[in-house]
Image: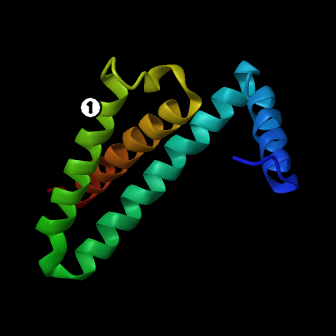
């Protein structure tokens, strides 16, 4: 790939973000935001699927498949996502999504 100004700018931006996220407190804050975003996503999925009564099974199937694929990628030794920040954020969003769905299920009493 050619070294254009845009490529150089994006490389420097990515390196700067990685340098900032080496700090453990910033990393923890980023993962906390990812969990909270997952909870928001879970609440949004349950409320939109609940409004349209015929999409409950489809939405739950899609969420289950996505969660299992993320788990398979994260916990496999082939991809080594456990060692990257992107993998940790993806796993945190998955945890938040499933927690949000469980929270709604307990609130509704089902």
Q: Nearer the viewer, residue 60 or 7?
A: 7
Q: Quadrant of the C terminus?
A: bottom left
Identify the residue at horizontal 55%, vertical 43% (top origin).
34
Q: Is residue 72 left or right of residue 41?
A: left
* x then y, percent, for residue 8: 84, 45
Q: Which residue is mark 1?
A: 72
Q: Is residue 91 left or right of residue 56?
A: right
* x then y, percent, for residue 91: 42, 35
Identify the residue at horizontal 37%, vertical 49% (top origin).
97
Q: Few, some or many C-alpha atoms within 10 Å of disc 1 (few <14, some 14-19, many ≥20)? A: few
Q: Is residue 10 left or right of residue 57?
A: right
Identify the residue at horizontal 58%, vertical 34% (top origin).
31
SS label for mark 1: helix
Task: In the displayed orientation, state which residue is furthest to the front.
Answer: 2
* x then y, percent, for residue 95: 38, 38
User: From what the image shows, is residue 4 above or below residue 56?
Assistant: above
The colour scheme is rainbow
Q: Nearer the viewer, residue 23 or 12?
A: 12
Q: Nearer the viewer, residue 36 or 24?
A: 24
User: From what the image shows, is residue 87 above or below residue 64?
Assistant: above
| Picture quadrant of residue 109 | bottom left
Q: Is residue 17 left or right of residue 55?
A: right
Identify the residue at horizontal 23%, vertical 40% (top origin).
68
* x then y, percent, for residue 2: 76, 48
């Amino acid at each position: 790939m050619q070294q254009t100004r845009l490529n150089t700018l994006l490389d420097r931006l990515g390196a700067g973000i990685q340098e900032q996220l080496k700090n453990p407190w910033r990393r923890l804050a980023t993962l906390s935001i990812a969990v909270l975003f997952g909870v928001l996503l879970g609440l949004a999925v349950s409320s939109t699927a609940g409004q349209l009564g015929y999409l409950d099974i489809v939405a739950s199937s899609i969420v289950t498949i996505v969660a299992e694929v993320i788990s398979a990628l994260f916990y496999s030794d082939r991809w080594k996502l456990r060692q990257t920040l992107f993998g940790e954020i993806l796993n945190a969003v998955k945890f938040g999504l499933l927690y949000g769905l469980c929270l709604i299920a307990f609130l509704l009493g089902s």
